[in-house]
Image (cartoon, rainbow, N blue to C red):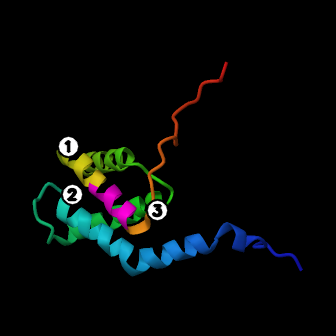
Amino acid sequence: MSGRFDGHDRLVGADYENWLKWWRATGRADLEDILLRRWDPLGSGSSDAVEHRDICARYATRIGMRLRHGISGAEIADLLVAASGELGVRVDERRSAAVAMEIRTWYRDQRGDQARTHWPMRFTREEI
């Protein structure tokens, strides 16, 4: 009998399962720690605030999923800048860029993964 999830094993392969085990075991906590230490989304200067921890946990999850798909340091910085703007705090682009590069370096060291440099593109031109 053919079910709705036939081929699921091809879509969710061993690579994803391996990544997910790593993410749950250490990846998420490590990324949250980097954000807590280096990114100040509330402009408070304190990583002890519960609200700060919640925000960092939320963005760690968003960034983590994108890291798996090859997000670049520049894209991480853009995400952090946008987040700061949404939270209504002063945007520090230099700090966001430094945090983004630290995250990208950490992920490369952890997973041996290189950022993609060719995607996503806002638009494409037809080749002549």
Report which residue position mark 3 lands on.
65
- The quadrant of the image that shows the C terminus is top right
- Crowd around label 3: few <14 · some 14–19 · many ≥20 (10 Å): some
* Residue farthest toward the right in the current orientation of the protein: 1
Upstream in the sequence, badge 3 or badge 1? 3
Q: Any mark on residue 94, and which?
A: 1
**On the picture, is 36 further left or further right than 125?**
left
**In this rendering, position of residue 97 left or right of residue 111:** left
Query: Closer to the camera, 15 or 97?
Result: 15
> 110 or 57: which is nearer to us?
110
Inspect the image, locate mark 1, and give the three-letter code of the amino acid beneath it: Arg
Residue 57 in view (yes/no): yes
Q: Main secondary structure of the magenta part?
A: helix
Could you tell me which secondary element the residue under label 1 belongs to? helix
Report which residue position mark 2 lands on: 39
Q: Which mark is residue 1?
A: none
Give the spatial CA distance, label 3 vs label 1: 23 Å
| Figure quadrant of residue 45 | bottom left
Residue 85: horizontal and vertical position, in percent?
A: 27, 45
Q: Residues within 10 Å of mark 2 (few under 14, many from 20)?
A: many
Q: Are marks 3 and 1 in contact (CB under 8 Å)?
A: no
Magenta residues span 102-109
